[in-house]
Amino acid sequence: MSIERMIRIIAGSFILVSLGLGVAGSPLYVSQHWLWFTAFVGANLLQSGFTRFCPMEMFLRKLGVAATS
């Protein structure tokens, strides 16, 4: 699996979990402050689309994940 695909899966998972923790109607609700994490992930995806700088990519490379296609 490529690093790009892993990043998409991780980002999507972060967004769904943080929405579950931050939306009052959710059975997982903890606090609406979790929505800040959702906004952070979205902003990071946006900036990485323009700048090609992604902290998660750097983190995965340091863990030794190979950039396969």
Image: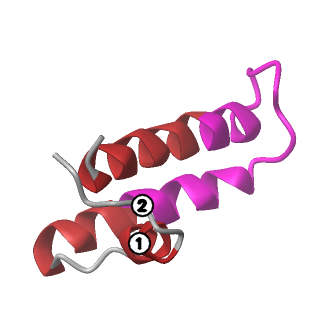
For this rendering, which residue is in front, 29 or 53? Answer: 53
Residue 61 circle label: 1
Q: For mark 2, give the secondary structure.
A: loop
Vertical arrangement, residue 16 with respect to residue 6, above or below: above
Which disc, if any, is residue 65? 2
Quadrant hosting residue 58: bottom left
Start and end of the magenta stretch? 17-42
In which quadrant is the N terminus drawn?
A: top left
Residue at the location (83% across, 47% down)?
31
Percent position of residue 40, x then y? 50, 65
Q: Position of residue 21 (x, y in %)?
A: 75, 38
Q: Amino acid at mark 2?
A: Val
28 up-or-down from 41: above or below: above
Evaluate if marks 2 and 1 touch, with contact meaning CB atoms under 8 Å apart: yes
Amino acid at circle 1: Arg
How far apart are the alpha carbons under marks 2 and 1? 5 Å
Eyeballing the image, is 7 above or below 24?
below
